[in-house]
Amino acid sequence: MNKEKQQSELPDTADTSIVTVGIKGMHCAGCVATVEKAISEAEGVLSANVNLATETAQVKLATDIVDMQGIFDSVLSVGYEAVELKTDLDDETEFEKEQEAEFQNLKTRFIVAAGLTILVLLGSFHSHLPILYQISQQIMRISMLVLTALILFWSGRQFFRNAIIRARHGKADMDSLISLGTSSAYIYSALATLAPDFITTAGQSPDVYFDTAAVIITLILFGRMLESKAKRRASSAIRKLIGLQPRTTIVIRNGEEITIPTRQVVVGDLVLVRPGERIPVDGVVKEGSSAVDESMITGESMPVDKGPGDDVIGSTVNRMGSFRFEARKVGTKTVLAQIVRLVREAQGSKAPIQRLADKIASYFVPTVIMIAVLTFTIWFISESLSFALLNAISVLIIACPCALGLATPTAIMVGTGRGAEMGILIRSGEVLETIHKVNTVVFDKTGTLTVGKPSVVAVVPYDGHTEEEILQFTGSVEKLSEHPLAKAILERVKDFNLVLPSVSGFKAQPGHGAEAEVEGKHVIVGSPRLMKQAGIDIDQVSQEVDQITKRGQTAILTAIDKRIIGVLAVADSVKETAVDEISLLHQSGIKTFMMTGDTAETGQAIGEQVGIDRVISGVLPEDKAAEIQSLQKEGNKVAMVGDGINDAPSLVQADVGIALGTGTDIAMEASDVTLISGDLSGVRSAISLSHRTVKTIHQNLFFAFVYNSIGIPVAAGVLFPFFGVLLDPMFASAAMAASSLSVVINSLRLRKFNI
């Protein structure tokens, strides 16, 4: 069954999931294309994104028919190794250990190659060295042949093994180019050493190029070792996050304190945390109190007081007293594990610009081989075999699809990692690339531009009722509501220590208010609009309502049996940073909007206070997405900033959804970007980070294209007829290694990003 048919026959209701698969053995963009194609053809796989920088693949699959072993076998069949990565923090650590072991193996092979290469180079210049000049040329050449064989087929064995595997499947990659180049130099030199008459009979000089083959392998190993180290630095954000969770935890079981690995903590465990210790998992305080440093999550330096009933987040630091808490989220469910998952998914994703680079790279290696063959043919006809061979080897070696393959993913990896360190969780490379195009930012009001904790600042009685009576009837209805304004009213009720009667027939009016039966009376609580819809005369309170809205406050009316008994003024203060951040966005040429369900007067008052360009008032939650769509139709690239829960539809509709939250599940899942601290400065930081990352990507791609566009023709000898310039294969190998390394180092500059 072909892939298209397989996918079309999947039921629409089939559950899908995404797994992250670690890939070993990739070195260039050609490897990426090969692995991606192999995984995509496995049964049950809907799509696959392979990332060279992170050495991972994100695989979307139908869980009801998935065969992970089939995926592993597919990857193995094209010469690579795959292992499933889970979101458990210990699993992440194990993968890091495996990567470290591979780096150490690479380092060992380089050291051996470097030592043997020095001996080969001494052999090449033996006639000029007093200690060695008496040794016959043939003995030196045989010694160099043996030493070079050790370099090629032990230190560089991976290149040849990979090339053979790729060839069996009709594929070629960077290792294929290296193997062709070095083996050609070695075989020619071996013939010149063991059968010089064969070379001279052909009219060629029996020169040897053992030093060329040895130096090429050594320099490439050195380059890959440095590249591997640089890539590990690029992914340091993941390691830093993982390192935040303590490895052991004190739990109370059967009345005894025992220390266990954190991964063995289960939901319901009673956990003891002492001063100075990190909280191991997420939970709720049961006994004791303390002040907890939550800067890892919120970015706020001031510790937060915690007592019975308060939530605590894993990996935050207990600063003062001891307390016990009940574990509620463990393993992959903790906030930290979810942050790690989101960061790894973002780092492993592809930006749209990378897809173009991957497509070009898929044709790169075959094209280079054709150019090398053409180079050899032309120079063999016009010059000599050795001349043709050296130029062809230079073409094979200098060509670098590695730089092309690393240009985008390394920048995405470092950019998203730096964002995570700043409390900015960016869902994918595509999102990171899109943010810099935003020219319009739409803010929700409550909890976004305002503190989100409204309070009742005034109660105006009517019709002979007292303030206590108004609060009693209003609170009775609002106690069943989940609206933030309802909570503010209930807080005022607490101040009066009022007892609220039971209600019946409660009915919420989303965006407007609520109604219910209280002590046999029909009570309506809500906006002036709701009162008018209910046929209630509000003329007597209209002046008071106008004064409230002009002050930027919200007017809540309470009516009993269709008669107004009171007006409550509720105020939500503007965030201290809102005015400055809106001003800075304007300086960047970005338009700002505010959407609110409040009246035009209230919305305008808040808008003028923070300096918003335009206020869209009276918008119900279900209509916010339509307003975003309207702005998009006008040609705007829109970012929506909200709380990540109530604003979910508009966050999804926007080109970029930005949630201000505390790292909750819903906030993370509903948005493209989550600002964990809830600080508005994160909006501008995310846009600036995107600009810097995209600029870095363009720089990397420009260098990769220019390098190959200039390097390959020079290596082919196009300058030789005019200027007598040739590129030695050893210099070509150094240039190739430097090109990959330079791309990674340029991306690493993003680690220092600050707005």
Image (spheres, rainbow, N blue to C red):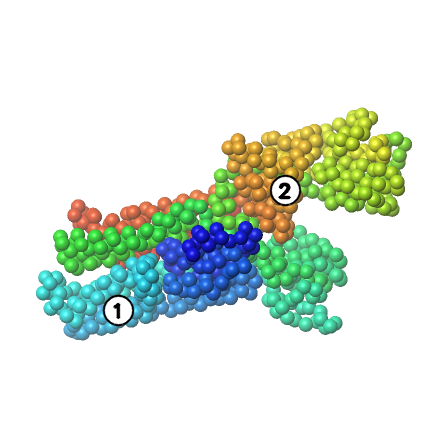
Q: Is residue 254 above or below residue 405?
A: below
Question: Which residue is the site of mark 1?
Answer: 148
**In the rendered structure, are the residues bearing label 2 and label 1 in contact, judged by CB atoms less than 8 Å apart?**
no
Residue type, numbered disc 2:
Asp
Question: What residue is drawn where x is 13% and y is 52%?
Answer: 382
Residue under the image location 81 percent in, 40 percent down? 516
Secondary structure under badge 2? loop
Q: Secondary structure at mark 1?
A: helix
Count the marks.
2
Q: Position of residue 619 (x, y in %)?
A: 66, 34
Asked where in the image residue 571 lies, by quadrant, the reply is top right
Q: Quadrant of residue 88?
A: bottom right
Q: Which quadrant would residue 529 be assigned to in this image?
A: top right
**Residue 221 position within the rendered picture, expressed as x and y whole percent measured from the top left:** 34, 63
Residue 728 visible to the viewer: no
Say if 418 sits above or below 97 in the image: above
Q: Which residue is mark 2?
A: 647
Q: Nearer the viewer, mark 2 or mark 1?
A: 2
